[in-house]
Image: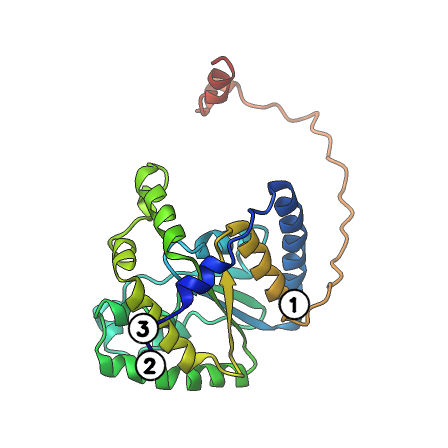
Amino acid sequence: MTGSTEPDRTEEVVRERLPRAVYEKELFRLQAELVKLQEWVRDEGARLAVVFEGRDAAGKGSTIKRVSEYLNPRVARIVALPVPTERERTQWYFQRYVAQLPAAGEIVLFDRSWYNRAGVEHVMGFCSEDEHQRFLRQCPVFERLLVDDGLLLRKYWFSVSRAEQERRLRRRSEDPMRRWKLSRMDVESMARWQEYSDARDEMLAATDTAESPWYLVESEDKRRARLNMIAHLLSTVPYHEVPRPVFDLPSAPRSDDYAQPPRGHHHYVPDHAASCARR
């Protein structure tokens, strides 16, 4: 498919940025619901996998951070696989991702996923055209098997306009605290905008299925995007609040017989904070 209209669609939805106070209040409410969702997943033995895909600098990472902020890392984990090893390149393409899927009572957040083959690998020539077409044929079958086995699979694509992507990437290049986020692939994504658009449209045409649909997140305003994505995820899972045990904490035992060793017997971290307060 060619002639993607994604840039035009995204630019049409530019709105006034959501006020911070409104955003933070609703985000905290939604994060409280995510904790309830987590407890339901653990109690029910459910398996939830959430795929985050989209343009470079579209806000996937920051959204994942807000989703996972208050979750138990023993229940919810983030998967961001590195470049495949030589051995992994000889395996069935989906094999290394299968190993990362959730077991009962777990949530997995995929910071990019098997859809690398439909995007960066295809556009940058890291896979052959035969491998790309095989992926587009096999992926719906793969996901159908997962869903049929009871896995709760949710897929989100984060869209951003060409102008906003450039602004965010330039901000990364100029900010020493964010420069580590900028990679050669990010730079290439700007130069190959239309190629990525065509690859995205072809991917959606092949893998947006009734069993495993794609949900598009318009992310010109990251605050809106985060709230919209989290609210939608919560609306698609039939969770309910699970009662948690209430513990009666004992009174702290008296320690009259304990004598703390002299301060000089240990190495203490210097009080850097005190020097900050004097500045």
Q: Give the residue number, with chain letter if any, for mark 3.
A: 117
Under circle 2, the secondary element is helix
Q: Which badge, 3 or 2, is on the more N-terminal residue?
A: 3
Under circle 1, the secondary element is helix
Q: Position of residue 229 (x, y in %)?
A: 56, 61
Q: Amino acid at mark 2?
A: Phe
Q: Amino acid at mark 3?
A: Arg
Split into 4 quadrants, where in the image is the N terminus?
bottom left
Res 235 label: 1
The answer to whether any part of residue 111 appears in the image is no
Vertical placement of residue 177 versus 37, above or below:
above
In this view of the protein, which residue sits in the foreground, 93 or 165?
A: 165
Under circle 3, the secondary element is helix
Q: CA distance from mark 2 to mark 1?
A: 30 Å
Q: Position of residue 114 (x, y in %)?
A: 37, 72
Q: Which badge, 2 or 1, is on the more N-terminal residue?
A: 2
